[in-house]
Amino acid sequence: MTSTIDSPDTRVLHHWVGGKPLEGVSGRFSDVTDPATGAVTGYLPLASEEETAVAVAAAAAAFPAWRDTSLTRRTQILFRFRELLNERAPELAALITAEHGKVLSDAAGEVARGQEVVEFACGMPHLLKGSATENASTGVDVHSVRQPLGVVGIISPFNFPAMVPMWFFPVAIAAGNTVVLKPSEKVPSAALWIAELWSEAGLPDGVFNVVNGDKTAVDALLTSPDVKAISFVGSTPIARYIYETGTAHGKRVQALGGAKNHMVVLPDADLDLAADQAVNAGYGSAGERCMAISALVTVGDIADTLVAKIAERTRVLRTGDGRRSSDMGPLVTRAAQERVTGYVDAGEAAGATVVIDGRTGGFDADGDGFFVGPTLLDNVTTEMSVYTDEIFGPVLSVLRVGTYPEAVELINSNPYGNGTALFTQNGAAARRFQNEVEVGMIGINVPVPVPMAYYSFGGWKNSLFGDTHAHGTEGVHFYTRAKVVTTRWPHTATGVDLGFPTNS
Ligand code: NAD
């Protein structure tokens, strides 16, 4: 495969429609940057409403033949896609690092977690099996099937350029739908690379399309009568908008939003383990994960000891270009960098103790990248904006409470409910926590409890609008609709009877 994505020179990107690149003609562009250097590396065309309609039309045209393609053939293509991705995952990881900034090992990890969903979707023949009942009534049989919806739209955020789209499209495609993906305009190259890989795997033209753009393209997808379902991941205000607009236009919508994830440490926990995991979960991917731990809740009198252990581990982290031997890369944009340092300023002004200050420091990179070092704030309270808002940066805030019920009350009062973790050696406490806490994904001594592909990913409250989570059997249900068929093959005429049919 010859990649149409050149790197690292500045280039004009494109859309991907009907199995080939499509030049943008709207005349609107946004810059793509390398966050480690601050350099502009590409110009992304932002689709107009008409260009988005062209992508939807290509997907709609491809749907009838793809829906009727046998499950055997469909899954053969998925297996081929999996093999190609296994061979070439480092290329995709490099593209992710170049536009997102996360370190290469982290980018490779995201590709691997996305690949798990491809592997799950390879089992679609089993997942789509319906049920059958013989002789439900005398001589009457009943069976159910699940059928694809048609064209589905996927709108994804910047922080997982490959994994988040892969939560959705393998399941959607394997189930017989066709896809229009609108990636984040900050990180478009991964989606275009994936589109080329699908072609190489033998996916028919038009089954997987990429339209690059902003609100204009998103609104065109949300209002198009040919788009039957929308899967969205991003910030809560946009997720709410997507849900409300998409459902108002008659679509099925799952819209995953922002997060504020708490890690509770009980007094009996192994504090070295808790400190290791708090650092990993707080600063991995520079905190730009929807499952990052941003609020550490200490219970009882362990706070001073635990904060000291976390600080000791944090001080030695290396922040720099993700292509070098860094532990943590930059933030995605200059605006993100400024927003995060602004929150640290506000926290300090409100009385938080700045234990480790990432606002300044030596960063291992050339140029003028968007760096903020790992930052540890102690004595944070629930009124401070560092706690109330999703910061989405490498800032770990420590909140001190006296008892377990106070910790649960804190989490349950928070408007978000994506992930949470409890660190303890007490099974009864863990059992009580998982029962009482109002959050969709829970880790017991696991700080970032991202479910495996055969379970479903999704939060509660303001972290998800809609009632279906991503991938797993919920994903299969989202991308299919059920039919129930009742059958009789009478041997003789039954006679006319206008009464309501009852069983006999
Ligand atoms: P974002 O909401 O800014 O953008 C997400 C997508 O929506 C992008 O494709 C963007 O182009 C589009 N968009 C932005 N503004 C829009 C508008 N006004 N109208 C229509 N579309 C618009 O999110 P982001 O900054 O790219 O990603 C970070 C956010 O995503 C964080 O809040 C994070 O918690 C969240 N996130 C959530 C999950 C989850 O599973 N719940 C996973 C990853 C990221």
Image: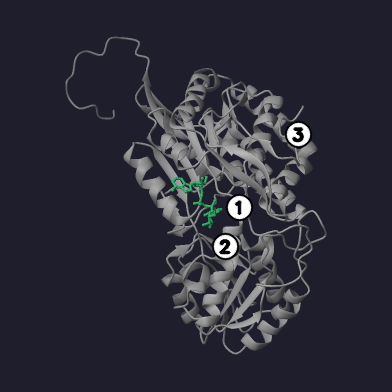
Q: Amino acid at mark 3?
A: Glu
Q: Is residue 446 visible?
A: no
Q: Amino acid at mark 1?
A: Asn
Indicate the position of residue 144 as horizontal and vertical percent values: 44, 30
- Residue positioned 64% across, 44% down in the render: 162
Indicate the position of residue 141 as horizontal and vertical percent values: 40, 25
- Residue positioned 60% across, 67% down in the render: 293
Q: Is residue 331 visible?
A: yes
The answer for how far apart the CA atoms under marks 1 and 3 are is 25 Å
Q: Is 155 in front, or is 427?
A: 155
Name the residue that disc number 3 marks: 83
Circle 3 residues within 10 Å: few <14, some 14–19, many ≥20: few
**Up/down of 165 relative to 147, above or below:** below
> Circle 2 — which element?
loop
Name the residue that disc number 2 marks: 392
The answer for how far apart the CA atoms under marks 2 and 3 are is 34 Å
Q: Amino acid at mark 2?
A: Phe
